[in-house]
Image: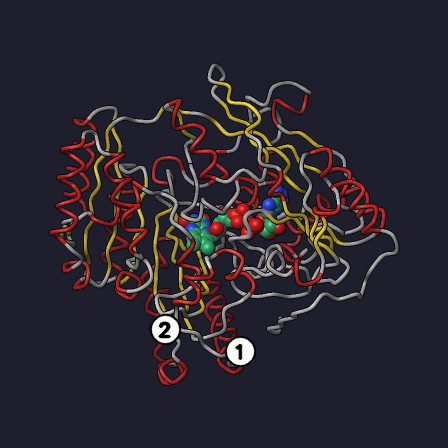
Amino acid sequence: MPVKTRTASSPKGAKPGLLTRLEAIVGKDGVLTGEAALPFATDVYRTLETPLAVVRPADVDQLQAVVREAAAAGVAIVPRGGGASYTDGYLAVRTDTVLIDTGGLNRIVEINETDAYVTVEAGVTWAELKAALDPLNLRTPFFGPFSGFAATVGGSMSQHAISHGSGQFGGSAESAVSVDVVIADGTLLRTGSAARGGSPFARWYGPDLCGLFLGDCGALGIKARITLPLIARKPAFQCASFAFADLPSLARAMRAAALENLDDEHFAIDAPLAQGQIARQDKAAVVQMALSVLKSSPSLVAGLKQLSKMALAGDRALRKAEYMVHYILEGVDDREAKARLDRLRTLMTAEGVEIPNTMPTIVRGMPFAPLYNVLGPKGERWAPMNGILPHSQVATFHAALEALYASHAEEMTARGVWRGGMFEVLRPSGFLYEVALYWPGEQTAYHAGVLPAEHLASLPQYAEDPETTAFVHRLKAQIIALYAKHDAVHFQLGKLYPYADVLEAPTLDLVKAVKAAVDPKGLMNPGALGI
Ligand SMILES: Cc1cc2nc3c(=O)[nH]c(=O)nc-3n(C[C@H](O)[C@H](O)[C@H](O)COP(=O)(O)OP(=O)(O)OC[C@H]3O[C@@H](n4cnc5c(N)ncnc54)[C@H](O)[C@@H]3O)c2cc1C
């Protein structure tokens, strides 16, 4: 798809009376058009078409009514959660699109401690969910991506997410019990035990209809409510970090640790990310993090000790390492957490060395960071990509990717394009290899929507260079092709990664039949999943 940016509303595709009817449902303030719609219609990477309107229902009834009206008018219907994705997932590919912002569906519907589940509306963010569960000493197994201040439970369930809790409990989909979905005619469809009209406590009730809607990128309907399991928070934890000289040795160690199911979560980064993007914090964020470390420590003395260790260690060791992996391990008591750490140390130090645990300690204290990372450390544009590789392919993919970068080295340097890598093991069987590209480019409506104006103004500003933007776009396509060559699958398919065009015919037929059953006119997020 060519890179395309529009800056004004388009009257193209307007349907007589539709906006008035939508306003009658959600109120005048709940319908945004033109410039006001643009921040919602721009993802972290780019903008495609400007939709007819962004509509913001305040509850599930309004959501159903909006979908009914839009469907009756024959316009495309595209759901948006926190908007923290970068794969065109909620971007409009037609001007006659109603973009539905689920931000108003922000109620925690039920916390059922006895039956151990929590039901939320789709627009609840992971940070809001955690804040509601913390006082009860409860959590969900997967408890959000790093973007959880903005990312919603509905968004993450719709495109798959990993990070917090993924070491023990896998990705977002593994922490879903039931979903209530508004399909293209406005009907509310329930799954699992809730499909009988009863409580949503159980997912496994006949075929997995809940799973059908997980990772659909909104192509099959709009999640209105999601039920997740509750577990007790463990009182003890340990943090540890290790450095490696090269990616294959890092990947081997991470795989070994995953096989033994030791950690609650982990993440690994390469040197460019450690020195730039991830390690960067402004002063306010550092103070906030220090407070969080104190709060999450077992005692004030332990917290102060940890802080002084963090200050003493600085990031000297981090700066020397090529690859670093950071672990958070939990236990029912200190003894269990330490036993897990001892075993992890044995596995990691077979090929790596231990380094200060500054970064996981910060993440433990503050799992959801402000979205400063949507721009590079010098205000550069940022485009991440992910591929989940079988472990057997990691080393060869890495070598091929390095060769690709080498073949473009001159142009990357000339254009100021640089790259980093981030890695996680997804259960023992998959290795998530995330690529981040950075380049000098103009800030967009997305950045203006999510970052404070004074922060944006404090960063270097770049003029848009269409040739550099096109170069990055081509490089992304080449990296995606490389993932495909190495048997990768992708989270967050959106409208970017291959799906429909690579499925075997019988599977694609089934996916299309499901789509036709819930969305016969093809109105629901056209282009998502390639269907
Ligand atoms: C700084 C930063 C850090 C990140 N860290 C992580 C990370 O640690 N792990 C990770 O996996 N990802 C991460 N991401 C990517 C992204 O934030 C997550 O994937 C997140 O889950 C997206 O949620 P969202 O609510 O913002 O979804 P959106 O971006 O709003 O939407 C994503 C997709 O879901 C669809 N959708 C949204 N809501 C609904 C709904 N209610 N019903 C049906 N479809 C819907 C949209 O149409 C779109 O296709 C990060 C992003 C940023 C910017």
Q: Quadrant of the C terminus?
A: bottom right
Residue 159 visible, this orientation: no
Could you tell me which residue is drawn at 82 percent across and 60 percent down?
A: 14
Residue situated in front as seen by the camera: 422 or 122:
122
Circle 1: residue type: Ala
Q: How is the image coloured?
A: secondary structure
How many dots with numbers?
Answer: 2
Residue situated in front as seen by the camera: 331 or 129:
129
Q: Is residue 516 left or right of residue 233?
A: right
Could you tell me which residue is drawn at 83 percent across and 51 percent down?
A: 18
Circle 2: residue type: Trp
Location of residue 345 with respect to 527 vertically, above or below: above
Cβ of disc 1 within 8 Å of ligand 1? no
Disc 1/disc 2 C-alpha distance (Å): 15 Å
Residue 132 place in picture, x, y as percent? 45, 29
Residue situated in front as seen by the camera: 424 or 199:
199
Cβ of disc 2 within 8 Å of ligand 1? no
**Residue under pointer 1:** 470
Q: Secondary structure at mark 2?
A: strand
Q: Is residue 509 left or right of residue 317?
A: right
**Residue under pointer 2:** 418
Farthest residue, direction top: 114
Q: Secondary structure at mark 1?
A: helix
Residue situated in front as seen by the camera: 437 or 427:
437
